[in-house]
Amino acid sequence: MKDRSRLRPQSNRWGRALSCLLISLSLTALLPAQPTAAEAIPWERLTSGMQVALWNPSNTCPQVPALLMLQIDPERFRFSIHQFRDEGLRAPISIHDWQQRTDAYVMFNAGLFREDYSYLGVLLKEGRSLGSKKHHSWQGLFAAEPTDGTLRKARVFDLAFDAFAEDPPLYREAAQSLMLFDRMGKLRVRDSGKRAFQTVVAEDGQGTILVIKTADVVSLHHLADCLHRQLPSLQQAMAMDGGASSDVIASQDLLHAAQETASQSTWRSLLSGNTGVHIPLPTVIGISPRTPVRTGAPVESLQTPRKP
C-alpha cells in the first residue's frame, strides 16, 4: 500500500499554483485591453517621406475627437517660418493665401501671438529673430534646418532639458510654444477644462516629425494624455496656437498626386481646407521638398533619398 501522506505536500503545491493562476487570469480579465494604436492608425501615403491619416481614438480616449495626422521625414522635407511683417505684408493673411504665396506642400499655424500680432517667445527665420525673448514658462520649441550638418534636420526641443543657442543660432528656423508631454512621460499641461481646436507638433523615436490637427475641440490635457498613452512611439510633443488659429492645409498638387480612395474623403476635405473657419494667421510654418521644384515635374520625382 502506497504511503499517501508523502503525496500531500506536492498536491498542496499544485493546488496553490492552480489557485494563483486562476486569480491572475481573473484579474487580467478585469484590466482594460492594452491599445495597439500605432498599428491601428490608417496611414496612407501622400508622397515619398510623407503620410497622412485620420485617426479616431474614441474607444480608448472618449474625450478626444478624430485627429488629422501628418507624418513627415525631415530628411526629405524642409520646414520654413513665414511671418507677415517680415514678408512685407500689411496684415496677416489666411492659410490658403500663405500656401499660394509660398507654394509649400503643407502649411500649419505657428505658435501664439499678442493682439498686435507680435509673436510670443522665440521665433527665428533663416537665423534672424522675428519674435521676442524666450518665454519663461513655455518650454516647447520646434526647430529646423540646423547650422551644423551633423544635427537632425528638425526636432522638438524641451527647454526644461535641452539647451538652445540663439547667438549664434543652433537652428535657422524655430518657433516656441507649450510642451504637451516630455520624454520622461510627464504631462506638461494642467487640466483647465478649456476646450478648443488644437495643432500639435510631435517627434517620434526615429526622428520623424508629426503634425496633428484636431477635427473638433478638446482640452490640451486630455489630448496630451491620449497621445502619450496610445502612441508610445512619440517621444515628446508640443502644442502650437489653438482655437480659431489652429489650421493645417496641403497644396492641391500634393493632394492630386496621391491616389484617391473611398476612405480618403474625410481627411482630404480637412487637409484641403474646405471645412471650418480660416482666420488670418500672422505666422505659419511651411513644409516643402528639399529638392527644388521643377515646373511640371510630378510630385514623386521631387524627393531625395533618405540618408543612411
Image (cartoon, grey):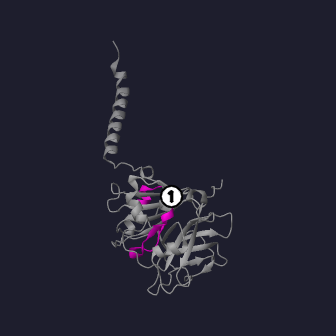
Q: Residue at x 39, y 53 (%)?
A: 263
- Is residue 237 part of the magenta span, yes or no? yes
Residue 236 visible? The answer is no
Q: Position of residue 268 (x, y in %)?
A: 41, 61
Q: Position of residue 131 (x, y in %)?
A: 55, 82
Most foreground residue, 131 or 291: 291
Most foreground residue, 152 or 25: 152
Q: Residue at x 34, y 33 (%)?
A: 18
Q: Residue furthest front?
A: 296
Q: Position of residue 1 (x, y in %)?
A: 33, 12
- In terms of secondary structure, where does tag 1 sit? helix
Quadrant in the rendering for residue 219: bottom left
Q: Residue at x 68, y 68 (%)?
A: 148
- Is residue 101 part of the magenta span, yes or no? no
Amino acid type assigned to the residue bearing label 1 in the image: Ala
Q: Residue at x 56, y 74 (%)?
A: 81
Q: Residue furthest right?
A: 149
Q: Which residues are magenta?
A: 226-253
Which residue is the site of mark 1?
257
